[in-house]
Amino acid sequence: MPIVKCTHCQLEFDESVMITEESDPSLYFCCNGCQGVYHLLKDDGLDSFYDKMGNSKIAPPLAVDNDSSSFDMESFRQRYIKTTSDGFSSVDLVMEGIHCAACIWLNEKVLADKEGIVEASINFTNNKAKIVWDEDTIALSTIIDTIRSIGYNAYPYDRSQEDIKATKNKRDYFIRMAIAIFASMNIMMIDVAKYAGFFSGMKEETLHLVHIAEFIFATPVLFYSGWIFFRGAYYGLKNRILNMDFLVSSGATLTYTYSLYILFGGKGHSYFDSVAMIITFVLVGKYLEVIGKKNAVDTMDKIRSQVPLEATIVEDGVKRVVPLDSIEVGNIIEVKTGEKATVDGLLIGSSGTFDESSLSGESLPVEKKAGDTIYSGTINTGKVIRYSATKNYANSTLNNIVTLLEDALSSKPEIEDTTNELSKYFSITILLLAILTFVGWYWYGGDFEQALIVSISVIVIACPCALALATPIASLIGISWAAEKGLLFKEAKFIETFSKADTVVLDKTGTITEGKLTVKDVRGEILTEHLPILYALSDSSTHPVSLAVKNYLENRFKDIEIVELENIEQIQGKGLKANYNGKVVLGGNGKLLKEYNIDINLDSDYTVYNFALDGKIIASFELEDAIKEGAKELIAYLNSIEVEVVMATGDHENVARRVAKEVGIKNFKSSFSPIEKADYIDTLKEQGKKVVMIGDGINDALALSKADIAIAMGSGADVSLAVSDVVILNNSLQAIEDSFMISRRTFKFIKQNLALSLIYNVITIPIAMAGYVIPLMAALSMSLSSLLVVGNSMRIKRG
Amino acid sequence: MNSVLTLELTVGIIVSFTLLGIFIWAAKGGQFDDSKKMMDGLLFDSQDDLQSAVDRENRVKELKEKKSKEQDSKPI
């Protein structure tokens, strides 16, 4: 069968599974959601969305069942809605389902065309949206329904002061950096004329004009763009620390002052170009730091937006909506279809199904019966249920995870910044040497101008540019190289941490294995008369094992007869029991069969599903989770670079052992709960190890947050991606090998760069102190040292 | 020779600083806050998009006027 693209989402599927339309056979849809949205956009004249999408693919529309009326509630209003100076209402949202610029265009267009909406702007970089609307014309719930109708979703978030500050700071640095780059580029152009004149001769008046032009461009760079260095130096001095900012600002100011002296009558060359370059180079590095901080704030806002706002409690038959903090232990809570459970508790009354993917990573709904624990943060995918709260919100799973993540994000161990450590001593040393040079030359020579020029040469030649550039330029090249290979290092500092990692902890399901069960082997014979019964039994549960058996039967046998089973009963953790024509039908693991006194002697390293009829085993299915492509190669690579590999999984020991053996892992931990995984990482860290944790699913989120480096595979849940330090976009294990290779190589070059800049200073400073270097040569030599560092960093990608 | 150079430099500096000023004005208004959107925005400015933006602006203006009238007529 040919593969065709879904007309809406552009994902590719087998033609046989696609929905087609008689009226237009050229249309293919992968689901009803895509079909619905396509027609909605077409009817509203918004089908130019598909032209704007280009080659991008989007996810099929999100099916959101829950009611949007909570957006109109008073408690919501108090917490999230603000009133603008014009008297309109304003809310901040985090958008879900945004994949490309066309998604932004579509949402903004649909919202802006709606009567009553004053402003709808969505930020593509962080998916945050701001909506301003007139409450007399349109309700917020209608706006949310509009977003949902085109296949996206939105959650409110409380825009923190931290976020406002980070946005303002980023914009401020951006403007300062843009001015510095603009002025430096102009000065460089003027420099071409100046240096050409220096070697071939230039009239004094012409040189003076060139100096004036450079002065005009360099002044805003020093005093506006460079203001942050003066501020940093001031705070440093206040705390009695001579930091890098001090050296940058003092070096630039002294050079600027000397150049002013030349401009207004002194003999020689001005160094306004050096002033602009020093500030610009170091400022670019600072801007990258500011972006990193802003990203951390955005991530936390995304996590917070996932927390529900209120819950429905039932007291004496009366339903009441209360804020989360008011829920007490013992309260009966009602959860409608599609809603999230807000606190932990025990299910009462009838059974239900919950999507626990946010906690366990298990993508299929889990069936719950009366008395089973309901975890906060899981979504009710079945009918309306009620449960009794056993914990308040503060102690519930969801809040614990949010708090832990907040702590992890805000207190990630800051690795010791070698450059900053060095620069502290570097600054003091250079300053002392410059003063010493000035005093020495003035004392012995008696010429003030000569002494000043030589001491400035010392500061300029020892300019911290190379030192300041050593780390950021190499990191930048390393990060962009990684990005080309589908790896996102969230912050530059993770390169250093990664390069030092000596232990890798891997999750099993979804990381080493595909996370999808398939039937590997069948023992016994499936007779034609048994087939419909077995099929009906496997069809009556959504458990992954039942689904795998059902899929196997559907693929192997055609036109299976449909029969009805009676009294189907789910036996927790064991399987299913039912009746057919008065006979007992059983389907499940060995424990289930033993319970019904059926002998089973099957010792397997795989997950086993047995099918028994009337006390006799008919067939046993061995199921396996296929090993991911590249898993063996990754383990072999990690072993070759002497990195310790541990597999930590929640699975049974037999299964874990088999998988570990198959891929070549010697050390594995089985039957580990998410908390045990996190504790294990803590133990490793206490032993002094630098740990990389690789996982997916939110069940790994805790362990990921504890590790020195967290890697979430691309298909992982949003929160997992949020806590990870390195995100693998293409979901391939080869990318992990690349991460190790790139980070180690980049860090090697950072060390080389630092060594180069230090050697440069050790050689040139004594020459400058001896008076053999005029400031112009000092500035040129300083620029050359920067070039040396940049050139060396370029070699990173040649590996 | 130098007078030509002076004129060129003066005009160059004035023009470039004016452009820089416009850029700062746009940056302060938040136009470059979203780096991804900024890069793609240009592709989506078709005639239809611009027309609907104008219509939208007029509608918002009417809404604002209506709102301010309502606020003025409210008893103090």
Image (cartoon, coloured by chain):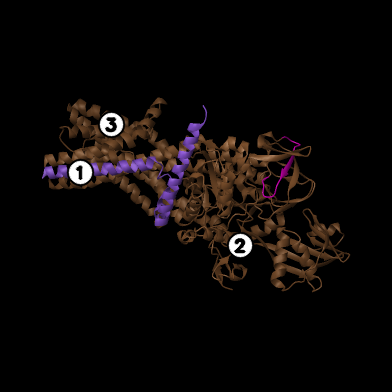
Q: Nearer the viewer, mark 1 or mark 3?
A: 1
User: Residue A100 at x, y = what percent?
Assistant: 48, 55
Of all chains in the rendering, the one displayed in purple is B
CA separation in Å, label 2 and label 1: 62 Å
Co-location on one chain, circles 2 and 1: no
**Which stretch did the figure color magenta?**
A328-340
Q: Mark 2 or mark 3: name the one nearer the start of the chain.
A: 2
Label disc, if present, on residue A434 of the rendered structure: 3
Residue assigned mark 2 = A31
Q: Residues within 10 Å of mark 1 (few under 14, many from 20)?
A: few
Q: Chain of mark 2?
A: A
Whether residue A602 is visible to the viewer of this picture, yes or no, is no
Locate the N terminus of chain B by quadrant. top left
Q: Check residue A412 for magenta coloring.
A: no
Query: Residue A320 versus residue B72: which sits nearer the camera?
Result: B72
Q: Secondary structure at mark 2?
A: loop
Q: Residues within 10 Å of mark 2 (few under 14, many from 20)?
A: some
Co-location on one chain, circles 1 and 3: no
- Amino acid residing under circle 3: Ala
User: Residue A403 at x, y = what percent?
Assistant: 61, 38
User: Residue A347 at x, y = what percent?
Assistant: 76, 45
CA separation in Å, label 1 and label 3: 40 Å
- Amino acid residing under circle 1: Val
Q: Chain of mark 3?
A: A
